[in-house]
Image (cartoon, grey):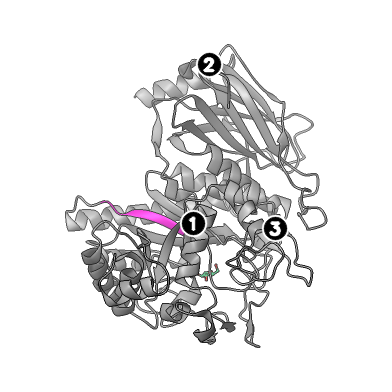
Amino acid sequence: MKMHIILAAALLACGSLLVAGPASSEGSAGENNLQSNIIIHPANTVGETDDALFSSFLEHMGRAVYHGIYEPGHPKADGDGFRRDVIDLLKPLGLELVRYPGGNFLSGYDWKDGIGPKQDRPRRLDLAWKSVETNQVGVDEFMKWCAKTGVKPMMGVNLGTAGAKEAIELMEYCNHPGGTYYSDLRKANGHPEPYGVKYWCLGNEMDGDWQICHKTAEEYGRLAYETGKLMKLMDPECRLTVCGSSAYRMSGDWETEVLKRTWPIADYIAIHGYYGVPDGDIPAFLASNLELEEYIKKVAGIIESVRHSKRSDRRVYISVDEWNVAYHGDRIPHEDCTEAPHIGEDHYVFVDSLAFASLFMTILRNCDNVKAACFAQLVNVLAPVLTENTEEGGRSWAQTIYWPFLHLSKWGRGTVLDMRIAGDTYDAGGRTGIGYLDSLAVLSRDKKELILFAVNRSLERDMDVKCDLSAFGGGRVAEHTVLNNDDLNAENTPEEPDRVKPRPGNGCRIEDGCLTGALEKHSWNVIRIRLDKGESK
Ligand code: AHR
């Protein structure tokens, strides 16, 4: 009842009754701008964002680690061989966690190969990516890189070729203070203090036939439970993620079985989602997040159903621990087994940043059920940052998808508001009624700012947006930031690293508690609204 009153009030707001118009097809409705009305109220909230939602993923794959974060001899490498230029690009992203070391790589990896004197470490064949793994970066180097980059580790344990024994040995190596074999080995390797790793993933994509030692849900569920049980004995506070599905089409029975078997130890269940351009259909691509929305809702429903069947008070949340736009790169393992091959190197174009923004907004809009998320990956492989490796060193630069992540990480933390949008829609990719406007509203943690994030999905028409802010006491527009480009295929390159980059917008104002704004066609927008009388930061 209350919601209906608020909706009606908002629809009548800003001086006009704005309702969703008939589905309009782009380019056919004349010169008029599209219309959208955002309906929000401070009393209608989804929940608080968890900092773990602002996380990423780094795998021993292609040039992510070697020639990505680690390149001894590069002019910008520090004394440990880590590229400072890459760290400098990553730091503004404000990442909370970085998931490591895989990925498919994890399921064949022996973490003990990557510790001790570097000259004694074995070169191994990595069958996941048909590569040579030199083991010059292992757990100790990764922890050092995390400290330098200001992120926390989310460690994966191999449940493919390895099992519970190797997992608890790794946990002992990382977290036990001393006086036992593996904790003393860590000390002997030059790391006296325990790392205090809190987040752990029990395997990777174990539902996929491509996975090294892939398992049935029953096999995996039992192994994950026994492994997690021992890990919780070592550290009852550790946060464990069990494998969910590798893709939406694979979800359902797998989650049900795995959750039934791991319920007492699972804190999160992972889902993975990668999105591309179906049949070159960009309007459908820009609505990819609607599939992710269905995926999250489906898995949230399964969690609730298992919880009821167990008559449990425990809460298990979703971790979207691999998500991204992914369609440009070649992810086929190299048959020639080289070190750090060029695989998975998507060169993102401008329009990808819009789909990426919508995917991330979807994750945040579901912050009541999703408590962790790692976009995949971080450097070179499906990444916001690319590097060159040349005789002279090589440059590094931010790709187009870097910007929406930075904006949402910087301003998307706080209370997510439940939002309704009344406005123009289109049909694409078999879906009807896709809103041209995709949006997210977040009330900052100090309650002094309301931040509206918005994608205008139209490729043809600008959009007039309205939002009644009277329930927030009005406010003033502190900043409007726009990411847009005339060329949907524009990309950032070492020669033109700033071709796609945010700029100020000036199409938004608030009068009598009503926000009106103009959103350019195919644009990403951040509208920061100052709710107090103070100066904006
Ligand atoms: O991120 C690349 C790969 O995609 C990961 O190794 C795997 O988990 C997923 O299939």
Task: Assess whether residue 324 is covered by the magenta stretch.
Answer: no
Residue tagged 1: 147
Q: Is residue 260 visible?
A: no
Q: Position of residue 227 (x, y in %)?
A: 27, 72
Point out the stretch of residues depicted in magenta. 315-321
- Dot label at residue 474: 2
Residue tagged 3: 348
Q: Position of residue 523 (x, y in %)?
A: 69, 40
Secondary structure beneath disc 3? loop
Q: Earlier in the sequence, mark 1 or mark 3?
A: 1
Contact, CB < 8 Å: mark 1 with mark 3? no
Say if 261 sits above or below 421 in the image: below
User: Would you say 134 lies left or right of 319 here?
Assistant: right
Say if 520 sits above or below 71 in the image: above
Among the 4 quarters of the image, the one containing residue 16: top right
Q: Amino acid at mark 1?
A: Ala
